[in-house]
Image (cartoon, rainbow, N blue to C red):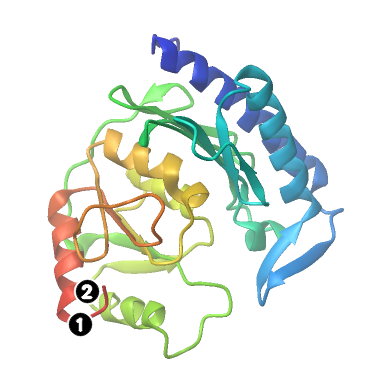
Amino acid sequence: MTHDFGEYGTFLAVAERAALAAGEVLQDWSGRFSVTEKARADLVTEADVASQKVVYDLIHSAFPDHGFVGEEGLRENTEAARRWFIDPLDGTSNYVHSFPYYCVSIALEIDRQLAVGVIFDPTRHELFTTVQGRGAFLNGRKLAPKSPKPLSESMLIASFPPGVTADSPHIRRFLTALPVAQTIHRSGSAALNLAYIATGRLDGYWSAILKPWDCAAGVLMVRETGGVVTRLDGGPYEVTEPNLLAAQSAGLQQELSDLFRAHQLT
């Protein structure tokens, strides 16, 4: 399906091409990489690095004056009006264990506003795309807003940091929401979590550990399908701060935010 996104369409086409190419790199490296730890339980592989290089090379060749911020140490022209956030392998621990829930995530910010996002899951050949003001799409099919659900009927998902301890606020948030939600999971890929809220497969997600490359593309997708993204306390979300609460409706966001504030977990 063809969509006319004007200038943004050019950015999107290059990002799609980069994400698909990076997905091929990840699948090619599958089963033959070595693993190192950036910190305890925080893994990196050759696949992460090779995937990021492919994404950077493709986008930089098309837009050499743009800025870049990537997970694997990529920092270039970071104060540019147009800058890309790149996560070449979101869900590295899943990838290492051959658990098929990982992706490539790419987003473009223009004048500090999220403008274009692409998330590619190479295990399911699912390409999630979004353009500011034009909606979000899965393999070219436009996604529609879903019917709101209350917290008691919602499937939620949460992030924990590598090496999380039993007494951390991340665990306390999880245990606080567990009795009142229908079900809660932890997946290991923030980008796919947000893409799944955009599709309606999940209802809500929170994290206090994210980097811009983890969530930029997915945040735009959630918003473009009628969802809400705030801080845990309900305040305005900022992509450079590791504090996110995303929900498929304003009502669910309010319920979760009220719950966390009541237990001083924001």
- Left or right: 94 with respect to 236? right
Q: Which mark is residue 260?
A: 2
User: Nearest the camera: 199 or 218?
Assistant: 218
Q: On the rendered image, what quadrant is the N terminus found in?
A: top left
Residue, x 80% and y 52% (percent of image)? Answer: 46
Residue, x 19% and y 48% (percent of image)? Answer: 249
**For the residue carrying disc 2, how many other residues have a C-alpha within 10 Å: few (<14), some (14-19), or many (20+)?**
many
Instruction: Name the outermost residue toward the bottom.
Output: 167
Query: Secondary structure under badge 1?
Result: loop
Query: Secondary structure under badge 2?
Result: helix
Q: Amino acid at mark 1?
A: His
Q: Residue 178 occupies which quadrant of the picture?
A: bottom left
Place of residue 212 in the rendered image (x, y in percent of width and height, measured from the top left):
47, 50
Place of residue 107 in the rendered image (x, y in percent of width and height, measured from the top left):
48, 36
Q: Amino acid at mark 2?
A: Phe
Q: Which mark is residue 263?
A: 1
**For the residue carrying disc 1, how many other residues have a C-alpha within 10 Å: few (<14), some (14-19), or many (20+)?**
few
- The answer to whether residue 128 of the structure is visible from this angle is no
Residue, x 85% and y 60% (percent of image)? Answer: 34
Place of residue 52 in the rendered image (x, y in percent of width and height, measured from the top left):
69, 41
Residue, x 50% and y 62% (percent of image)? Answer: 187
User: Nearest the camera: 69 or 231?
Assistant: 69
